[in-house]
Image: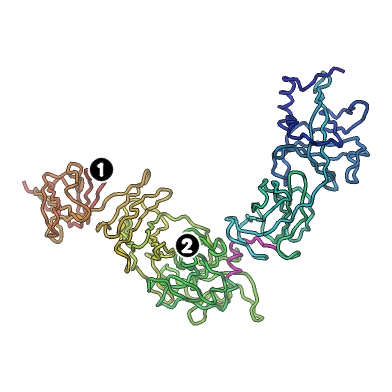
Amino acid sequence: METNNLLKLIPLIALAAVFSCVFLLPKSALAGTSPDWSIGFEWNNTQIIDGSQQVFSLNLLGLSQYTWPGGPAYGDVFRGEIHNNAQIINGHALGSAGNSSQIDIWPSYDHYFAVIYDTSGIIYTSRIQEIRNWFQTGVGSPPAHWGIITFEITPQQLLPLPSDLNQFGSDETTPIGEGQMTTKNAVVFKAKVGGPNNDRVGLEVELRQFNEPFTGQYGGGIVSSDSVLSGSVVAIVRYGLAEGQYHWRARTVDSQGNKSDWLEFGTPGNVDFEVVSLGQGAADLAKIVINAPYLGNGNSFGGKGWDPLQKMYVASDEIFTGYNYWNNKLRQVAFGAGLDCSGLVEWAFDRSFDPLRSLLHNAIRYESADGQYHHNSEAIAEANLRPGDLLFLDKNHDNRMDHVAMYVGNFVVNNNTFNMVEAYSPQQGIIPANESEFRIRTGFSIDQNIRRVVLSPAIGGFVRAGSPIDLAVTDPDGFTITATTLIQTDEEFLREVPGQLYYVERELGPDGFPDDVVYWPTQKTGDYLIKAAPKFGAPLMATYSLTFQSGDQTVTLAKDVPITQIPPDGYGVTVPTTGTTESFIPVSIDIKPGSDPNSINIGSKGVVPVAVLSNSPFNAKDVDIDSILFAGAKPAKNSYEDVNGDGNPDLILHFDTQSLNLTTNDTKAFLTGNLTSGRLIKGSDFVKIIANKKHF
């Protein structure tokens, strides 16, 4: 038999390519240890003889790396089988009687580690002391590689139990109490781990569905962390959990194969948490608050379950006892108990989804029944009803929804069976109901009024104010909403232009004033005009910020600007069909100063004067005259004078009437231009167009 020592350079490189780093372990890393037993192994399963002594035969299964599912996250694993061996470890004969025992070898910190096991589970774990005497035998195909792995046999230690076991939502901060439901399919498990000598240690978690017993076996149920310093808190995330009930336990592990006993989370034998659909989670919450008050009576803002002081959707007991909420009529934080009809939907879904996310970042993004109908749900057939679905009423038959209730599935109250929950009225509060009765109420449509929640619908755009300012926003179609825009119903004050613009004050800034937001469901192309005004009681030295967002484009309009410097004409933003959203400076213009109406005879040979009005901080003298266009025409001449008597010089422009691109259908005329700094300006004024015959 021809042999070549693989410690020579070229064969060593070839072997490294096959065995990766496992076989290049420095002996210095294992100095001072004593071998106890060895394994010989091979590629082609030929019997291996070490001198005159028969030892293990190890088939490396094609010498491919194998990632151990559910095993320690120490790196790629080399998997093999032990055959024809008389060695007995922990009462098990390894690979004897024609059977095989499996061995996994992987890099672990500063050394290599092995686990030997068969169908009964793990037999032994050990540090590898050294790898030596590699040979290549024969010249056939494939050649056989064999050698000796020497294992360090050390008594295993019982590690300390992990402590502070807890379970959280996927954000790692929202706790899931023992036995509670979560609507997320990812759960984070945390525990503190430690070793006897401040060694690096890790955490193993065994997670099983509640109807499955703990087995201690790897293969999907056990997940492991990376190693950490002793005394650290470890987090392990399990993704893709199916709906159902779960229980879990944890133990401490180290790189030597040492482990602690298992410690079960919470009370042994209990359900630790349950994964449910978001609709089911919302339905279960809705049932909990039956008999709570109705918060809203036409003279106050309806209760939505959001507490701006706690910055969260409150727990169910606070729906009964009371919480802080934003009162739209008073425009301040008030205290009350209960929910209104759309508030029941918003609270149940948004608390189930994430209680710490405010309205625009949660599952339900509209606070009125009409907004939830048009923008946060879609019609379904009655036959497809499931818990969490919604039913609406249009009591006035004006295509604006006045009431919403939630289907929750059958349940029993006082020996009566119900399948719905609704915040019915200020007099009756939150009550159980039945779909069969709801269907015959005024304003119900079987075709359109049974709907399923569309989670976290896209928002076309929004304007966000950094307090303490109120907003007034006009969209490209001329719809305007302000801080005082209110629709009073029998049950609440709504702050919306239905279907177009929505105004919310939910989150408080550091100064205690709310950060106002105006948002819209569908982005329109064209010009948005945004005006700001100081809130009542805002300090004179206060500053504000203002941002505009359209899709994924954000425009900063103001940042830390003193409220004494709010521009009177506000801010402008142009949203194009394609391309970049850009801001502009709105300017006030006066067509034919002193005339009302602003009549323009487009058949005349005269000129039309247009004044661009100065105000603080805008100075009309900063306008680049050559950049001006009014109704498509350039000015024939210009001058400066104070046309409105405010003491500021205004820019007077004259345009040849017949050069204006106007028709009798126009009711507004527009001016565009630039400042000498390059900033875009835009202004408009109303006109009345007359088309008399031209005079020659």
Horizontal placement of 550 versus 270: left or right? left
Q: Where does label 1 land, which residue?
A: 678
**Looking at the rendering, which quadrant does residue 130 occupy?**
top right
Instruction: Inspect the image, locate mark 2, and give the three-letter code of the amino acid beneath it.
Output: Leu
Q: Quadrant of residue 48?
A: top right
Residue nearer the viewer, 576 or 121: 121
Q: What residue range appears in magenta?
A: 272-285
- 137 and 158: which one is in front? 158
Q: Is residue 59 above or below residue 3?
A: below
Residue 666 showing in the rendered view: no
Q: Residue at x 28, y 56 (%)?
A: 570
Do the residues bearing badges 2 and 1 touch, measured as CB atoms within 8 Å?
A: no
- Which residue has dot 2 on it? 359
Instruction: Give the x, y percent position of residue 215.
Output: 79, 54
| Callout 2 secondary element | helix
Q: Left or right: 19 with respect to 357?
A: right
Q: Residues within 10 Å of mark 2 (few under 14, many from 20)?
A: many
Q: Where is residue 266 shown, x and y percent of the image?
A: 71, 64
Residue 76 in the image: x percent, y percent?
71, 38
Question: What percent of the width, then of the height, locates residue 21?
Answer: 71, 31
Identity, as a three-letter code, of the amino acid under mark 1: Gly
